[in-house]
Amino acid sequence: MKDRLLDLCQKLPADYVEVRVQEGVGASIHFAGKELEDIGERTQRGGCVRVLAGGGWGFATFDDLDQVDRYARMALEQAQLVGGEAFRLAPVEPIQASYRSPVDTDPADVPLADKHAMCRRYNEAILRHDRIQTSAVIYRDGHATTCFANSEGSFIEQTYVFCGIVVAAIAVDGANIQRAREDNGDLRGFDKVTGMDEACEKVVQRAIESLDARPVQAGSHTVILDPRLCGVFIHEAFGHLSEADFLYENPRMAEIMRIGRRFGPDMLNITDDGALEGEAGFIAYDSEGVPGARTPLIKNGVLAGRLHSRETAAKMGEEPTGNARAISYRHPPIVRMTNTFMEPGETPLDEMLQETPDGIYAVGFLGGQTNKEMFTFSAEEAYRIRGGKIAEKIRDVVLTGNVFKTLQDIDRIGDDRSMYGGLGGCGKKGQSPLRVGDGGPHCRIQNVVIGGR
């Protein structure tokens, strides 16, 4: 296959050609309440050709490798029809390499019946509690190998093994509905999901306790985010603004996201790191054959970098960062995050709490949305902070604000850091879910607007 793909890329009369061929197998199981909604094993095999010619991109997918030459010509014709201002991709060194993610237990070696029994056990553990109305247990794994070749002489073979699970509980008391969940998934293998019995008990307990919690009082509060919510905030509210295709298409945001501009205190550091092996967003090489890398986005409070494909790097006069990613051979690569997180600071959580006479401790993530620099996030759990200690549980905590003001209002960053993956992944331009990781330390933010009663 190697010689055939490289030969095809070389002989096609275009400025640039790349081919990806992917083969994979995966399993999925979904319990919703007492019902088994889905169970099965699936395979996929196919590929794509992407061609740059005369300033236009052409893209074609195929399921039959014997037809790759025909689809390559189709992609070339598309590119020639699209046309546009001619440009070159940012240069990278040709790479000949292979990678396979190390795992404890490959889920492909575990019978589907064993996976089903495990998920059923989790589901029954959640449903046996009286105040739990329904549950959800969703399992998914995937074992995929991708071969990449381009007209510059690169050939890369990569194999990744993902495994993840969600366990969730919904407690109901009249019109009062409360949810709790644990989402667990990365590239470490099947053992990651086998010890979720305690997590099932915890989601039940959290959902039931939230029924008796009082709604938060609306207003402006000092808030301490736990590492999970910190990671979601960094990914959703700031990480997407760092993706260079968004900036290149939005002159206003490109001016705001100007390298060298201050966005927070000196202690604030935000990073995207595709080289964290084992984490959900790890990539040895991106979908353009560029090595996964560590990219500082904010360094000592100042904007230091952004995320690039080879195209956006060339157009903005910067270096590729290894962030061109496609969820499968059916899609062209676009600029995406990998593992995005806030770096730890120096303040222990106990000290952070002691310095907070009145505030809110927000834990976990239920949902939210962003619109450019504006965000709205719902915490899964929350507690009042009184006299420097965590006090009673509260609910309906919805954080809103402007990401740039919020970053400026961070005044303490914890000395811890946790990373999270999961099944949810990231969505952009119709490509979802893409496996990513996010995380951070505890952090304290002043003047956060919280909706409530």
Image (cartoon, rainbow, N blue to C red):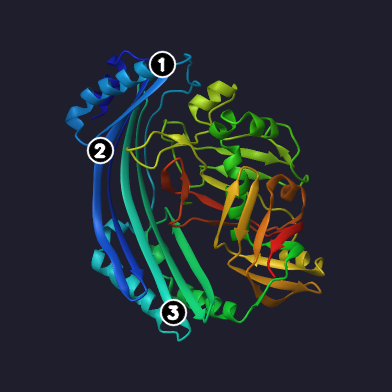
Front residue of 20/242: it is: 242
Residue 83, label in figure: 1
Quarter of the image with the N terminus is top left
Gap between marks 1 and 3, in whole Å?
A: 57 Å
Q: Is residue 204 left or right of residue 268?
A: left
> Do tag 2 and tag 1 residues touch (Cβ < 8 Å)?
no
In which quadrant of the rendered view does residue 127 lie?
Answer: bottom left
Q: Judge whether 73 appears above or below 109 on screen.
A: above
Q: Amino acid at mark 1?
A: Gly
Q: Secondary structure at mark 3?
A: strand
Q: Residue at x 28, y 35 (%)?
A: 47
Q: Is residue 216 left or right of residue 100?
A: right
Q: Residue at x 27, y 63 (%)?
A: 39
In which quadrant of the rendered view does residue 75 lie?
Answer: top left
Q: Which residue bears the numbered disc 2? A: 46
Residue 285: give x, y in percent of width and height: 43, 36
